[in-house]
Image (tube, helix red, strand yellow):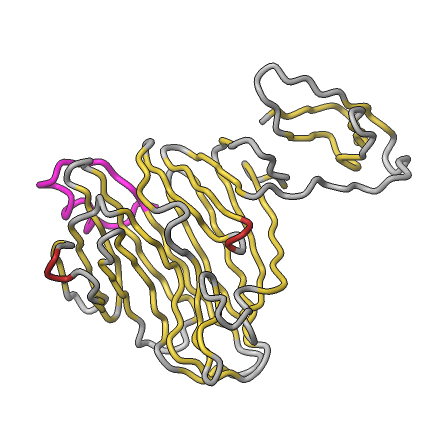
Amino acid sequence: MKTLRWTGRSDLKDLADGRIVAENTETFTFPAGVGETRIFRRLPPGSAKEKVSPPPLPSTVQVTCGAVKLELAKHLFWNLNGIWYEGTQVCRKGKGFYGTVIAFSGLGWVGTGHLENKIGEKEVKVSFLLDGREWQPGAMPAKGKSFTMKKSALLHQVRLEYEVHLENSRLRETARIHVEKNSRIGIMYHFMHPWEAIFTEYLLHDRNGGIKEGKFDASNRNRLVPEPFPLFAAFYAPKEKIGFVSRVTAEKPITGKDEWILWNRGSDRKLYYVPARTATLKSGNSYEWSMTTDFFTIPPDQWKKKAAAPEQK
């Protein structure tokens, strides 16, 4: 990425195609490959007859902040599509789904990965920030100190606002829902992640002090492992000495009966946060949850202590 800066607000015209690419600003950030030259012309604010027409979004967006790289995919309704830590792929790309899913009574599953009702996510709108500034992604991967994607989408009768923020190698995800019509739902889950099969150990702590730990192996393959009242979930890959810990917070819960669900599918380790298994959602109500994920590299005999340590702000 390259950034142009100048004194005095201007419109900016790309001389390659004549488009106005920025209006009434003193900076412009754009993708540029090695050796690539682009030429722009400053114009007085408001003098351009052509309105800003940003180029279409690429099919995927890749961003690295610190030791973590993310990919988001357009065909997956701008949900995550891969996570890498220190160059190692830790969450799957193209072979698993991320995001939010809701089972509506009388209709079935709605959300990412569930197109059987030909619904998925509708009215999807996204915006991006790189280092705190509005950003138009290009085809080239980007790097920065911080990255944010904000998304709005309609899941049948529920409006979802989903936000991804990456900074200092910490991933923070927020899911807010606004109920547009009275809805009876079965299970709802957020923050679905298909973690790689390199993770063979897990540690779960609940809000009541309970602890559950174990290994992903043949004994629990294709079995769902629930853990009510979740505080955090941590996975560890002994060979790579890589671990992560995900902590959830319910800012505006539906009920107090939330849980983790782990699913050892053999090819990956699915982790879901389930805020409710059944509920009646009233029109006009809003709910909110967030999850932070921190990654670390540490010897096998120290990883559980590291995962259970107080969160560093």
**The quadrant where residue 193 appears:** bottom left
Q: Residue at x 15, y 40 (%)?
A: 238
Front residue of this view, candidates 190 and 132:
190
Percent coordinates x, y for residue 218 in the rendering = 12, 57
Q: Residue at x 47, y 50 (%)?
A: 164
Total residue callouts: 0
Question: Is residue 312 within the magenta segment?
Answer: yes
Percent coordinates x, y for residue 72 in the rendering = 49, 46
Percent coordinates x, y for residue 224 in the rendering = 22, 67
Relative placement, left or right, of 124 versus 206 is: right
Question: Is residue 148 within the magenta segment?
Answer: no
Tell me the magenta residue range: 294-313
Q: Is residue 209 shown to the viewer in this render?
A: yes
Looking at the image, is 71 positioned above or below residue 191?
above
Q: Is residue 178 shown to the viewer in this render?
A: no
Percent coordinates x, y for residue 190 in the rendering = 40, 63
Looking at the image, is 180 positioned above or below residue 194?
below
Front residue of this view, candidates 290 and 236:
236
Q: Residue at x 46, y 66 (%)?
A: 114
Q: Quadrant of the N terminus?
A: top right
Looking at the image, is 214 positioned above or below residue 178?
above
**The quadrant where residue 100 appears:** bottom left
Q: Residue furthest top?
A: 35
